Amino acid sequence: MGRLVFLSVLSALLLPVSVSAGVASEEPSVVISIKDHKFDTERVEIPAGQRVKLIVKNLDPTPEEFESDDLGIEKIILGRMQTTVYVGPLEPGEYVFFGEFHLDTAQGLLIVR
């Protein structure tokens, strides 16, 4: 019987932690896709002062390198794969991103407002 009381007390202590973890706010997310060596959305807007999750999907069969000197990002994404990159919080402004393997076509702009 002592073990049951211990488990009940332990459950009562842990319950507030799991409930508060469930209500924690998530950062906003944006999906950016690469198809035919171009970004599907060349201008992406995100909120200033917040951390944002960028989900970059490479829909092409060949690899691409998602890169931004402005943001300090350099990620190779294999063909038909995706990666997640977190940015921010950022100041308002414009931040260039590009596909390193196809600079002539894969260009984009992250606009922070």
Image (tube, helix red, strand yellow):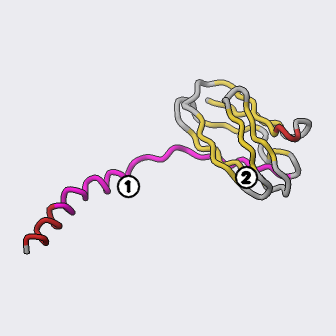
**Quarter residue 1 falls in:** bottom left
Q: Is residue 33 magenta?
A: yes
Q: Residue at x 43, y 46 (%)?
A: 25
Q: Which residue is mark 2?
A: 57
In this rendering, position of residue 68 left or right of residue 107: left
Badge 1 is on which residue?
22
Instruction: Report x, y in % for residue 60.
Output: 84, 55
Distance in Å between CA atoms under marks 1 and 2? 27 Å
Q: Which residues are magenta?
A: 10-35
Is 103 within the magenta? no
Q: Amino acid at mark 2?
A: Lys
Task: Choose mark 1 or mark 2, whichever is in front.
Answer: 2
Q: Nearer the viewer, residue 31 or 15?
A: 15
State left or right for residue 48 relative to residue 34: left
- In this picture, is 52 found above or below 62? above
Percent x, y for residue 56?
70, 48
Label 2 neighbour load within 10 Å: few <14, some 14-19, many 20+: many
Q: Position of residue 67 (x, y in %)?
A: 75, 36
